[in-house]
Amino acid sequence: MLPKPDYYMFAVQSRDKETMARTGLMRTTHGDIPTPVFIPVGTAGTVKGILHRDLLDDIGAKIILGNTYHLYLRPGTDILKRAGGLHRFMSWELPVLTDSGGYQVFSLADNRKLTDEGALFKSHIDGSSHIFTPENTIDIQRIIGADIMMAFDECTPFPCDYRYAIKSVNLTHSWLERAVRRFHETEPLWSNDQVLFPIVQGSTFDDLRKLSAEFVASAGMEGNAIGGLSVGEPAEEMYRIIEIVNGILPDDKPRYLMGVGTPVNILEAIERGIDMFDCVMPTRNGRNGMLFTSEGIINIRNKKWACDFNPIDPAGPSSVSLYYSKAYLRHLVISGEILGAQIASIHNLAFYLRLLKVAREKIEEGDFKRWKDSMTKKLSERL
Amino acid sequence: MLPKPDYYMFAVQSRDKETMARTGLMRTTHGDIPTPVFIPVGTAGTVKGILHRDLLDDIGAKIILGNTYHLYLRPGTDILKRAGGLHRFMSWELPVLTDSGGYQVFSLADNRKLTDEGALFKSHIDGSSHIFTPENTIDIQRIIGADIMMAFDECTPFPCDYRYAIKSVNLTHSWLERAVRRFHETEPLWSNDQVLFPIVQGSTFDDLRKLSAEFVASAGMEGNAIGGLSVGEPAEEMYRIIEIVNGILPDDKPRYLMGVGTPVNILEAIERGIDMFDCVMPTRNGRNGMLFTSEGIINIRNKKWACDFNPIDPAGPSSVSLYYSKAYLRHLVISGEILGAQIASIHNLAFYLRLLKVAREKIEEGDFKRWKDSMTKKLSERL
């Protein structure tokens, strides 16, 4: 087999006439990704509870996300380096995106301390001390070999004091300059091309978000991300911020909304010009028994499903959605059986990926807006 | 599709000349089972961590086991009745064997109290009070719809006082008479034939085992089981008891050794004329990181595998054994990731089922004894 070419590109393929929605194709060394795309979260080098073949065949994943924070702590960079990167370590041949560890340092690690240099933290696993900097998170992501790397940022909580938000966005910008410098000074370690996406911050303050979007756009990277949303603010605030930021981020580069969200959040964001999403919701909520179905949202633990022997979802986004009944899945989840988490995770991810597939089709057919408006009601309904 | 015929049969197909090993075919309404067979344990209506399609396609399971105790408590007989039996409830189309609940009442339930009538116990889930009798465990297994049902018995612990063992074996025998009566008085509730296997008890006492084997044989059921072994006694004691019992149990009926065991235990028991096995070892030990491989036994948590990027088992009993590396599986198990339990369970069960497949081939080829002697060393080796 010939070596794969080293390249990355993104091209818009079609545009919705009524909204900012568009379809595109992202090309990486490990494969092509049609956008808008939902990226299953594979925190520690595994999308929890799902075999690779099910990710590929039953869910149709084209890319997965790894968390730099988790992978750095375990298995650690020594093992990842000896394996030849994450793809080889975990036997995953399609693209991988890694976050920078910023969000996890602030949400998971103990005793974190922020300095201009970076973020000091203690491992949530064994309490050992570490530092993440804009530079070493690039180095770590080089070892991981992610097709798409993210710049180290501070993700502000909600609500956030305006003066803290200014300070934070300035810190994130100075970190971005250092990350970009390190990115240009270094090369991929493995046989795939790598790109770096910067992240727009600025909490829910319109002026800070504008400032940040302009700063991020000026970095001239191959794609751009919006962070710090879906952290507790009302959905309308999130949508407003997306509109402001997407009016500034370059239109010919992919726009990635990090950590979002519900199916409705995703359709609203696509309408506003977002191309990429990731979120733990389909897998984490699935493990707890919350299912997104073509008929509405289901809490499978509810007694009303105890004798419902119909398929989990007759629209069958995955084959497990059709094969297993609601009553059986309820029994598994209530009994704390692993298989319940597996089936719910496969179903929910397949539901998300099919939703995005239909969204792409609707954009191409010029029918996105009408479809989206009709879907948002159904998708929010609780059965 | 025509309705399936209602029948059950067992026929010996070939016999080893040097030992008591034999191959056979067990025919049930839900499908044929070549013997010797290993039955994956699906306690609460799920082989823990494994999708049905992987049980069928990657592991090659021909029958699974359900636990009457667990299924009775959850989902319960009301739901199972409304579903039309366990096969329909769990969408499993191949044969199912259920134990009688005896073993679980004594190993899992709280506040158990034995009377001539049956066993009073409190649920380990919610503390509610229940009674299992020879009659109602038949009724429950009729509702479950198991292709092969087991008679309610008392499983004695090891070591066991001789006087207690006599009392216990007499109780088990009187329970057997009542179970057989109930079996003949009742009919299957669903569209499949059901057979009842009695269980030989008698601890490690040769005379009690003989007595029990004769009593069980005289019941004239379609198959017979040996219980109360692999409960802590030395392997040589188990093998001696199997020889004694199998010298008495009818040769034209399948012999089922319950809850056994290691791969070596299984080969030794096949040599002594056993046809059916079940054990939680491949799945339970797999979840804890113990792997049975063609190269020997592996504790995947061991640091020596941290950078072993070779397949879990190059002999590849399942496709996951070849697809994933030891280093990756170690990472998953150490990190407590569900996927680690899934991969280890699929691999171990596939290893067991392939071992039995090869055993059947070796018996048919007349080479069983030599092969078994060469395998027992390799199978016990710890890497």
Image (cartoon, coloured by chain):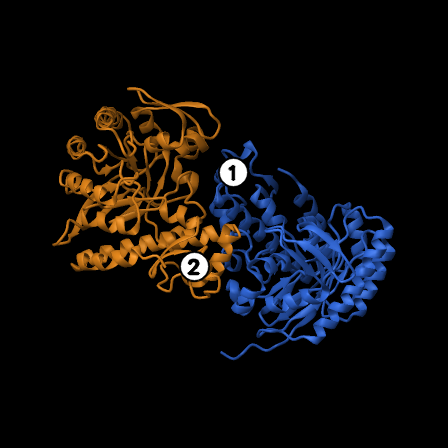
Chain colours: A orange, B blue
The location of residue B351, given as percent across then percent down, is 59, 51
Residue for badge 1: B330
Q: Can residue B258 be seen by looking at this rendering? A: no
Residue at 21%, 57% (x, y): give it: A373
Residue at 70%, 76% (x, y): give it: B185
**Image-based side of B228 in relation to A220, left or right:** right
- The answer to which image quadrant residue A149 occupies is top left
In front: A261, or A185? A261
Kind of residue sitting beneath label 1: Arg
Kind of residue sitting beneath label 2: Val
**Image-based side of B153 in relation to B358, left or right:** right
In front: A232, or B9? A232
**Image-based side of A86 in relation to B349, left or right:** left
| Chain for numbered disc 2 | A
Image height check: is A108 above or below B112?
above
Image height check: is A107 above or below A280?
above
Helix, strand or loop at mark 1: helix
Q: Residue A320 bears which disc, if any?
A: 2
The location of residue B16, given as percent across then percent down, is 73, 61
Q: Can residue A320 be seen by looking at this rendering? A: yes
Image height check: is B132 above or below A122?
below
| Chain for numbered disc 1 | B
Q: Mark 1 or mark 2, which is nearer to you?
A: 2
Do marks 1 and 2 share a subunit?
A: no
